[in-house]
Image (tube, rainbow, N blue to C red):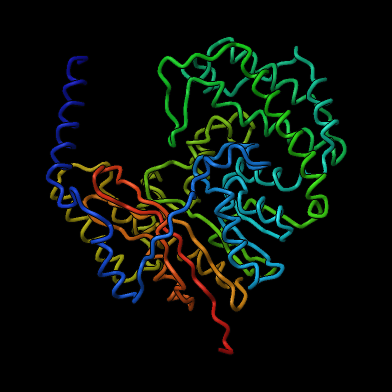
Amino acid sequence: MQLKLPLIDNITTDIRKKNILSSPKFGGSCDIDSKPYLKELGIEIVESRQPIQFTSNFGEHVHRWAPYIQGFSSSFVQSILDQYKNDYKSPVILDPFAGCGTVLTQSKINGYKSIGTELNPLLQFIADIKVNSWDVSSELLLETFSSIPKDLKTPAPEFLKSEHQFNKGVLRNLELLKGGIDSISAKTKEQTKVKNLILLAFSSILIDCSNLKRTPCLGYWKNKKVPDNAPWILVEHKIQDICKDLEVLQEKFKKNIRVESKVFLANAMEYEHECLFDLIITSPPYMNGLDYVMNYKIEMAWLGFTKEAKDAKKVKDSLVVCDNVSKGSIRTFAQSNAKYTNSWIEEIKTNIEENIKRRGNYRRNDMPHIVHKYFDDMYKVMNSVTNSLRANGRFILVVGDSLIADVYVPTDLLLAKIGTELGLTVEKVEKARNRRSGQVRNYRLRETIITLKKESKGI
C-alpha cells in the first residue's frame, strides 16, 4: 500500500501537467479574453500601476499592529481619499469587507467617520481594536504587560498541541503568556482596551512562533527554527510598537481620537445600515481557492473564536463563497431557484462544465455552481450597500479576475455589469497590477480598481 501512494501522486501530477500544456489558455492573456465583455459594457481598462498589497503596511502606524496578507495598502486607501477630497469635504466611508480595518484606520487618520462589516470574528476584533483604542495610555499598556504573571497557564486549543504546529518549549511559553494575559483585570473600559491590545499583540505573533508560514496560504515551513522564548520576546516588541504608535496618535491625531469608527460583526449581504455613505471602498474575497477562515485558524482558536472545526465551517459557509466552501452548501445553492444570474454567468458556467468533462480531472466538479454562487453573493452585497450610497457617491472595488478550468472569468467586469444593473455608472476600470494564474502560470491575469458612481437623479 505504501508504494502505491507516490505512484498515484505521480499520475495526478502528470495529468495536471498534461492539462496545463494542452490548455487553450497556455500563454494567453486576460487582455485578449476581456475584449468581448469590454465591448458590451462600452468601456476600456486603463493602466494605473500602484502598490495595492498589504505588505507595505507592515511599517505603518496602527496598520502594523496585526499582519493581514489579503488586505490592501494604506497608501492605496489614502490615494482614494486624496482623489475625492474636493468632491466630499467630510465623507462618511463604508468598507463592507472590513478585514483587519485598513480602510477604517486610514479614514480615522483623516478624521472621517467610517463603518465596516466583517464576518470573521477574529478580523472584526482586530479591526475594532485598531480604530477604537487610540486613547489608551502607552504607559498603562506597557505597565500592564510588564506586570502580568509568568506562572499561570491557559492550555492551548487541543488541535494545536501537536508539535506540527508548535515546538514543545514554544507551546509551553505560549500557554504561560496566554495565562498571564487572561489574568488581566478588565473591570473598566480602559482596562478592557488595554487587555484587548495585548491580546491583539499575542495574536499577531502566533504564526512567527509556529512551524508555519502564510504566503498567502497557511502551510508548514520546513526546518523553521523558533527559540523557546520567542513568544515573550516577539510580543514585547509588538507591545513596544503599539506604545510608540499610541504616542504618535495622541500627539499628531488627537482631534481624530473621538471620530466615529464602528466595525460590526455582520454579513454584508444582509446588513441594513442606518446612515448613508459618500464612499464605499473595499476589496471583496477573490475566487482563488484561498480559504479565508482556515488561513487564520491558529489565531481564531487561541483567542477562543472557534472551539471546534464546525465553528470554522459555520463562518466559512456564511462568507462570500470561495472554492473551499462545503459541498453541501453548494448543493443547496444549486437546487435553489431564487438566485441572481445573467447571460455572462450562464455562458461561463456552461464552458466550465464542458471543460471539466473534457479534462476528466478537476479538483471540484461543482465549480460551475461555485462560480455562480460567488456572483450571487456579490450581487446581494452590492445591492445592499448601493442602497446606502448617497447620490454622487462612489463605490470602489479592488478585485482580481480568474482562470477556472481553462475558462476566463472577468470578475471585475462582471461586478461592473452588476453595478450598472443596480443603477450605477461605470466611471472607470483601472489595472493596478499584473497577476499570474495559479492553474496555468503563463496565463496573464490582472488586479483592477473598479469605480462605480451613483449619479444624482437631478442630472
Vertical arrangement, residue 389 with respect to residue 311, above or below: below
Q: Quadrant of the C terminus?
A: bottom right
- Taking the image as shown, residue 277 lies to the left or right of residue 3, namely right
Determine whether 325 is above or below 432 in the image: above
At x 18% / y 32%, what residue is drawn?
12
Which picture quadrant has residue 271?
Answer: bottom right
Out of 4 and 244, give the one closest to the viewer: 244
Query: In the picture provided, is 221 more to the left or to the right than 402?
Result: right
| 208 up-or-down from 244: above or below | above
Q: Considering the image in quadrants, where does the N terminus appear?
A: top left
Question: Residue at horizontal 68%, vertical 41%?
Answer: 61
For this rendering, which residue is in front, 47 or 367?
Answer: 47
In this view of the protein, which residue sits in the foreground, 190 or 121?
Answer: 190
For the point 52% across and 40% down, the residue is: 55
User: x, y percentage for residue 203?
Assistant: 63, 31
Q: At which x and y percent is residue 448?
A: 42, 58
Extreme residue toward the bottom, this view: 458
Task: Say which quarter of the image contains residue 411.
Answer: bottom left
Q: Where is residue 161? Give x, y as percent.
A: 54, 17
Please give the count of numbered marks on the rendered protein: 0
Q: From the top left corner, tell me how far across and down residue 213 is, in percent.
A: 47, 27
Question: What residue sits 58% from the left and 55% below the top?
Answer: 77
